Image (cartoon, helix red, strand yellow):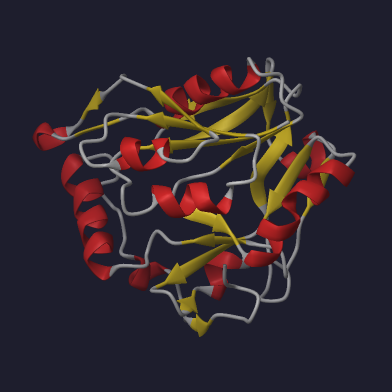
């Protein structure tokens, strides 16, 4: 069994595409953190989706709030592990597999003898360009993968380290998945497409939210920190 897990809050513009990308997974667990748009109803239209409701909120500056990322993730993992899955996939709603990974991920996981799978995230600007320096910090021909999937019996959890989190297995803190776990690291042309910056208005709103809420006061605009942009390679599509 492969279970895909994702956290949401007001992701009506993305959740359908995410669920579509994993429509052949055995189950998609969507832990919604208080959406006020159509996120839940859209996700619910997919037969392999189960909706969970995460109610914990963290108050920020200027009356803004967010879900605690680590607690939200662990809430999701707890429910996933109850199904005793072979594999758990975990990603954000704005990240989806390219067409090659989408077509082959089940076979890749079935054939892997590893505990974890890392994949390269391609950070898009709009829908036709990406930031090579962010997507491949080890060089344009060698992507640096981050966690995408793991075996369901690994006992993997997050550790709250604001503004994000790290990982642990049981009581053991994971410093580096490549050395601390038996790891399969996928390389190009397999990759994940990061659509967080596909719409300039949403980008500006997100940067403003992080700054004004005090959650990440020094949040930089992607155009100020992403480096040069390049056209997408032929495999960087869904």
Q: Foreground residue, 223 or 175?
A: 223
Q: Position of residue 143 (x, y in %)?
A: 68, 65
The number of numbered discs placed on residues in the rendered structure image is 0
Which residue: 57% across, 66% down? 135
Q: Foreground residue, 173 or 99?
A: 99
Q: Foreground residue, 219 or 24?
A: 24
| Figure check: 145 above or below 10 | below
Q: Using the rendered view, name the quadrant where residue 100 is placed.
A: bottom right
Q: Foreground residue, 68 or 19?
A: 19
Q: Residue furthest bottom?
A: 231
Q: Position of residue 218 (x, y in %)?
A: 28, 52
Q: Using the rendered view, name the quadrant where residue 238 is placed.
A: bottom right
Q: Is residue 21 left or right of residue 127?
A: right
Which residue: 71% across, 19% down? 84
For the N terminus, the quadrant is top right
Q: Is residue 184 left or right of residue 164?
A: right
Which residue: 44% across, 47% down? 93
Q: Position of residue 128 (x, y in %)?
A: 46, 80
Q: Residue furthest left?
A: 62
Q: Is residue 116 left or right of residue 145?
A: right
Which residue: 44% across, 61% down? 195
Q: Position of residue 210 (x, y in %)?
A: 25, 47
């Amino acid at each position: 069994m492969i279970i895909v897990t994702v956290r949401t809050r007001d992701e009506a513009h993305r959740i359908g595409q995410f669920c579509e990308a994993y429509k052949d997974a055995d189950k998609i667990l969507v832990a919604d953190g208080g959406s006020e748009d159509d996120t839940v109803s859209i996700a619910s239209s997919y037969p392999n989706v189960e909706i969970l409701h995460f109610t914990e909120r963290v108050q920020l500056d200027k009356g803004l709030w967010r879900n605690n990322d680590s607690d939200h993730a662990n809430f999701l993992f707890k429910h996933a592990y109850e199904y005793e899955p072979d594999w758990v996939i975990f990603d954000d709603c704005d990240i989806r597999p390219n067409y090659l990974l989408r077509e082959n991920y089940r076979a890749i996981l079935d054939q892997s003898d590893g505990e974890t799978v890392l994949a390269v995230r391609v950070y898009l600007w709009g829908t036709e360009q990406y930031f090579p320096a962010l997507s491949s910090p080890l060089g344009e021909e060698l992507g640096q993968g981050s966690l995408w999937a793991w075996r369901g019996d690994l006992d993997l959890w997050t550790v709250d380290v604001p503004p994000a989190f790290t990982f642990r297995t049981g009581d053991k803190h994971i410093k580096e998945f490549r050395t601390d776990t038996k790891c399969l690291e996928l390389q190009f042309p397999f990759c994940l497409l990061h659509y967080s910056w596909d719409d300039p208005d949403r980008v500006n709103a997100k940067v403003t939210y992080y700054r004004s809420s005090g959650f990440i006061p020094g949040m930089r605009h992607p155009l100020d920190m992403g480096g040069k942009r390049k056209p997408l390679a032929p495999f960087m599509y869904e």
